[in-house]
Amino acid sequence: MGVLMSKKQQVEKVQKCSAVVSAFQAGLKDRAAAAKQAEGEVEDSKGSAKTSDNPSEKNTEEAEHEETNSSAGPSTSQHASAPTRDECKVNKEAWSRLRDGKGVEPEELDKSHQLTPPAFVRPKREANDDQPVEVQLEKKEQPPSDEMCDVCEVWTADDLYPCRTCNRVFHDGCLRELGYLRAEALQEMKDTAHTVTGWSCYYCDNLNLLLTEEEMYSLMETFKQCRIIPESCLVSDELLQYRHFVSKQQFDKDLSDEQEEEVLAQFAALDPEKKGHIEWSDFLYFESLAVLKKFRTENSLVRLLTAKERDKARSVFLGLDLDKDGVITRAECRQAQQSWFHKLNKDSQSCNVSSISHVGPICESSPASSGSERSKTDDRPVTWAEFLKESAIYILAARPNSSAMHIRLPV
């Protein structure tokens, strides 16, 4: 009941503001009409003074002027009041639907001046970006999702789809109007947004937006030198050529046969549907993560995590820490890092810790695919702070909705 009362108060507050704005706009239009009429009277007085010696001409001019004013007056008031009446009618219908609890459907909104694509601003690194971040294990943050659509800023009782990464919520109609999601992506959002698997909005899905201007400039220069055409798909030969160039540039040597096989394995991971090419977005996300892993510290990567992602990491760690001593093993840490990509299983209805064992072997040398006993390295303890720092890059890599694997999993 408290939630309904709070929404009613918000509706009444916005309704009052809308009424004040409408009255203010109508007042401005009335003042403009009155000012024009006053100017006309002044000009008439000047003209009458100059033509006082001709009474017949004076009377004719006054008559014409009165007819003009009488004909212009009603039309001005009609133009001023018509938009106001229409606007009030639309607002009244909208707020009545809100009070009834149904809300406004996105298709019923006039979004011609609202749905402009957002201007993405790249982040800037702070002075304390590399300093350790204290994230408590026992205290969950549990951030609530926003109540209003991030695009149209209108609350509706139904049909709001939350992002699994941030607090934003969206109407499917607003996303369709923006043109960010195709029909298939919109249907996937409707199917997964309210499930445990979840859905990432266009902000969080785009890992390239995590790069600073300097980092992006460095990446684009590499693309230009390798003649990589943005927004184009890449085949395996093009990816091999690109990797050869990067190896030559960074290490002054070509790739070995083993490294070429790794590149082909990366291509297969980025092309899970076996199309024979990888999409530009998947390639860009893979390279963006490589830049983050190269230039950012683990503390800096932890700062990129959202409250929802930190809570998910807590749940995974506490599920593995069965004796509640705040420590897990190295092998369990690797299992958890692989568990972030359990979302790739479309048929799964849960991605909790109990399902980690069902993820299956993702790479040949992973603990899940090896029958050997745990080594001393596998038994090495890992604290919560170490777990979060080592897992941050994998949590970020799991943000995109694409089924492609944008990072090499730990071995």
Image (cartoon, grey):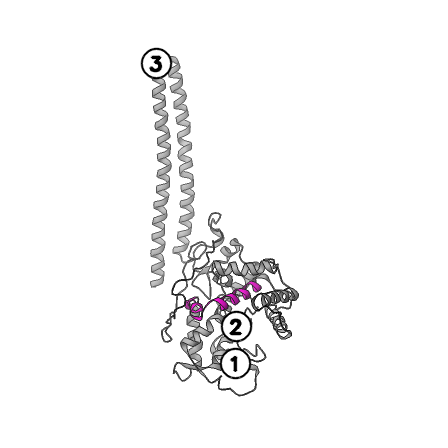
**Of residues 152 and 1, the one drawn nearer to the viewer in this rendering:** 152
Q: Which quadrant, please, contains the C terminus? A: bottom right
Question: Looking at the magenta stretch, what is its main secondary structure?
Answer: helix
Looking at the image, can residue 13 be seen? yes
Determine which residue is flagged by label 2.
341
- Residue 402, percent across and down? 55, 66
- SS class, disc 3: loop
Observer able to see residue 350:
no
Q: Quadrant of residue 2?
A: bottom left
* Residue type, numbered disc 1: Ser
Task: Report which residue position mark 1 lands on.
Answer: 357
In the rendered image, residue 298 lying in the magenta stretch gets the answer yes
Q: Nearer the viewer, mark 2 or mark 3?
A: 2
Cβ–Cβ under 8 Å for marks 2 and 3? no
- Provide the residue designation for mark 3: 52
- Of label 2 and label 3, which has the lower sequence position? 3
Q: Which residue appears at 63% of the width and 67% of the height?
A: 240
Is 350 part of what is drawn in magenta? Answer: no
Name the spot of residue 265 as percent of width and height, x first.
61, 72
